[in-house]
Amino acid sequence: MAAGYLDILRARHAARLLTGTLVGRLPNGTAPIAIVLFTRAEGGSYALAGALAAVYGLGTAVGQPLLGRAVDLYGQPRVQLPAAVLSALGMALLAVAGFASLPLAYAAVAVAGVATPPLEGGLRALWPSVLGSEDRVHRAYAMDAVAQEVMFTVGPLLVTVLVSLRSPAAALLVINAIGVLGALSVVLSEPSRAWRSAPREAHWLGALRSPGLLALLGSFFFVGLALGSITVAGVAYADDHGQESVYGWLMAALGLGALIGGSVYGARQWSGPPERRLRVIVALLALGYLPLILTPGVVAMTVLAAVAGVFLAPAIACSFIVVDRHAPRGTVTEAFSWLVTTFGVGAAAGTAVAGPAVEVGGTAWSFAVAGAGGVAALVVLLATGKVLAAPGHSAVAVRGSENDRNGAVEPGFSSGHQA
């Protein structure tokens, strides 16, 4: 698998696009921890921190489909870079103005969330034109998932380092400035400037007319809720132990576990329906979240966080092929945007619920929210098994088109669409 990744990275533009996208998404990946630490440093409550993080998450959830549609209409450079700059300005306003005006703080966070550029979907649209062969595109998707876990591992550590060296406000400013540079690197590349969206079939419901996709989105709302609640729960746990750095280590351990799980998952070929495999993976994911409720010592808790993260990347990777199998014809880009949106809404709900949970029942209650989210995600998949077992076959994409998302399947799978 490592040799295959190196082959991809040697392709012209590939390393630049992957690196630029990861750096450009750094503000989005670290926003929850940055907002929570900034709020606490300014004397705000956990409830306020959770509410602000929730507003950011909801803003991102609203903005991703809208900006994704704009990218399809106007191209990547004309949307991605202005959005990145506007998002960074929103966070800068929060860092400078603080909480002198709560409405202004909420507005700044909302703008930052809504304007978050859809770099993740943009990269997946570029891979076919950059790599050419289908096998290499498949491997690039697996590499993309693993690389994102590196970002989610390094990002929290970078935020805590900036906080310790300067302040939470400085962390907000620096992280978002770095994000703009990442987006700039992507949109100035030749593939990004040349990319144009393929035609798509119009329907007022779009991708949401697929029952199977709706079932998947319902499940991943709760996966997002579980992950979002851990953001607040981790800060509460760090406060209980009197060390801000503990939070960074917990989040890094969670990301490291996902990195390991994603690497192992992507290194082999799988057989059988991905819907069935997804149920098993989500069951293991829920099982990994439940022990966090015990809140043991720092070393043991860090180990539990790593174990809890192992099945996150495989669950997300497997969800991609399920999206592809159930998306109606010509709506795969939109379907992936809805997956990002639903996950973001769930994460926002998780942060909003976990904050009051800390104040009512303590740290263990906030981790219980994560456990409950994992169990609920599994219940949705089990309850909609018949719907998920009958993927639609109408989503035939034009093979070789620049945004042929139907070709984005895991190694060892066919997409289930007829040629």
Image: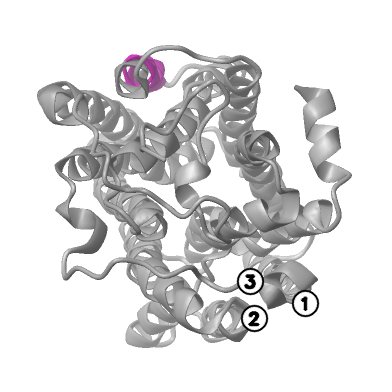
Q: Residue at x 62, y 18 (%)?
A: 299
Local SS, label 3 = loop
Q: Residue at x 67, y 64 (%)?
A: 24
Q: Quadrant of residue 88?
A: bottom right
- What span is in magenta? 280-292
The type of residue carrying mark 3 is: Trp
Q: Nearer the viewer, residue 110 or 76?
A: 76
Q: Position of residue 227 (x, y in %)?
A: 40, 39
**237 above or below 148?**
above
Q: Residue 188: which numbered mark, if any?
A: 1
Q: Residues within 10 Å of mark 3 (few under 14, many from 20)?
A: some
The type of residue carrying mark 2 is: Pro
**Nearer-N-terminus badge (3/2):** 2
Check if mark 1's residue and mark 2's residue have beta carbons within 8 Å. yes
Q: Residue 195: which numbered mark, if any?
A: 3
Task: Using the rendered image of the protein, determine whether residue 13 is visible from the camera's viewpoint.
Answer: yes
